Each structure stands twice: as structure tokens, then as C-alpha cells.
Amino acid sequence: MGSEEEAPTAGRRGRSPSIYEVAAAAGVAPSTVSRALSRPGRVSFRTAEHVREVAARLGYRTDLRNRRIEGEPTSMLAMVVADITNPVFFGMIRGAERTAVHAGYTMVLVETQESEEFERGLLARVLPLVDGAILTSSRLSDSAIRSVAKATPLVVLNRLVDQVPSVASDNVRAVKKAVEHLVEAGHRSLSYLAGPDASWANGMRWRGLLEAAHELDIKVRQIGPLVPTMAGGRQAATAWLASPTTGVVAYNDLVAIGFIQGVQQAGLGVPGDVSVVGFDNIRDAELVQPALTTIATPLVSLGSAAVNHLLATSRVSTSRYSSFVLPARLVLRSSTGPVGG
């Protein structure tokens, strides 16, 4: 025996009704249905209750992919990072997540495992489900990122890409500060422990080192590319021992810490035999022995700025291609000193 209040034909066929069908049945606009189901605080309590009752009666399912196809927001943002085990991302994630929650969004974290191919596949699966994305230290080419940005609201973090909203720290100026510090301590020959070739930040840091070397008339050479881990730093120590320089600037703190371990295992001292500067100022930088001189980037602020920029670009087209560069500072600790000191 049938019920007195049957679902509409769409429901009987096994297809979830669309947002437009729910709106028609509830006597409201589709945008009101979207707000009532995803952000109920933006409509009156009575309207939200009414829309939810109608949606439940019709069997409306808020499938994320369908909602994106129909133009509805999912209230979800994706943060894509290269390596979830790298401490440099912890602060960025914290800043981004707090800002997203404050704005009424849920942050989804995705790891690409430092692989361009893996990143492409993940983006194809994840982007249809979210309202926007933050690509953090992406390994994609600039042209590939621009293609993605045409289809999905996007901000690039820790990198600047032409014609795509971007947020980064001032890598070139920061490295110059580190080199100036080493030169003031008497160092005239430096090694740069390079990160991945696909890393934009790596290129900028090497550029800063070359510019500083030219301005200060010192010698620099590059060791790498290296995996941006402590293991990569220990590998760099082996190469450095074959032809030492008095100073070293590392791609990041993990590489710097691994390098220090490697030279100490070889019986050399830091900073007595070599001064070492890292990059990022992760928590472990002040815990190792000797404590690491490093370039501190505003990690939490970078993550927060990326979310704010993403939300702004989705609302105001005039800010679509703007970029923000945040300053970094040199933190002096015990891993640097005068030559032969």
C-alpha cells in the first residue's frame, strides 16, 4: 500500500533530485538551498529547517561531486603539500587550517610525495570535490599550474607563478643576508646544498647565492640536487669532504642538520671547520648541537595568507593575478662562526 506522500518521479527512478528540484519544492532559490545545507548560519533558522525537511523528504543527497557540477559550494578547500613528513609544512598547514575554519571551510590535506606525476593524478581526483586549492611547493611546471588555475580557484604557496595568485617568502633577499653574515665572519668560499631541481624555492635560493657572490666577490659552488631530508644532507657531507669550503648554505634545515651529522661523523667540528646555515627555522633547528643558524620564514603567516588570498580571488576578479611576498629573517645561533674558529 503506497504512502500518502510519495516522492517525486526523479526519486522513484533512483536518481537523487537536483538542487533545483529541492528549491522548487521548497519555494526558494537554489542559492538559498545551498546556503541552508552547507552554511545554515547565512539563512534564517526557519528557512534552514524548512529546506532540510524538503531535502530529506525528496531524498536529496549532497554528493560533493554533484554539488560542484551544479555550481554549489562544498565548503571544502584542499591544501596540497609535497611531503607531509617535512616539518616546514607543519606551520603552513596550521595557519591555513585555522584561517579556513574561521571562514567556515573544512581543509582537506593531500600529499604528492614529491612526485609531479602523482600530483597530477591527485589533483584530477580532488579538485572536483573542493571550492578551491592551495598548491604548496608544487612540482608541476608553471604552464601546468596555469592550466589547473583556469578550471579551479587556486593559490600557489611557497612559489610565485606568473598569472596565478601566489604567496611566498623573499628567498633571494633572505639568502643574501645569510651570505653577508658568513662573509663578515671571514668566509670566502661557500657551498650551496641544493634541493630538488623541480623546486622553485631551490632556484631562487641559488639565484640569491650567485647574486651575493658576485656582489661580494666570493666563490660559490653547488652540491646536488639532493633529496630535501637529513639523509640528503649526509649525502652532501660526503661530497663536501672531497673538496671542503669554509661555509655552507643548505636548501632547508633538514639538509643542514644531516650535513652537520655527516661532517661530525667524519671527525670535523661545526663551526670550527665549517659554518652551516639552514633555511626555514623548523623546531629542530634550535634543538640540534650546535644549534642551527637559519633563515626564518613566517610559516604560519604564509599558510594563513594563502587561504585569505584564495577566498579573495574567488570573490574579486581584480585580485586574480596578484602575489604576496613575505619577508624572512636571519636567526643567528651556534652553527656559524669565524673561519677557523
Image: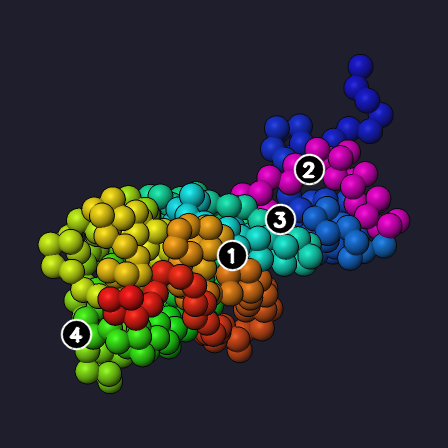
Mark closer to the chain start, 4 or 3: 3
Find disc 4 in the rendering and name its residue.
219
Nearer the N terminus, badge 1 or badge 4? 1
Provide the residue designation for mark 1. Answer: 92
Question: Residue 334 versus residue 25: which sits nearer the camera?
Answer: 334
Q: Judge left or right: residue 87 versus residue 210.
A: right
Let me know if residue 49 is in the magenta part: yes
Q: Is residue 36 visible?
A: yes
- Kindly report the distance in space between the C-alpha atoms of the residues bearing marks 2 and 4: 67 Å
Answer above or below: position of 337 versus 254: below
Horizontal and vertical percent position of residue 259: 28, 52
Residue at mark 2: 60
Q: What stretch is highlighted in magenta?
A: 45-68
The amino acid type found where label 4 is placed reads: Lys
| Residue with the mark numbered 3 | 106
Give the quadrant of residue 156.
bottom left
For the point 63% across and 58% down, the residue is: 99
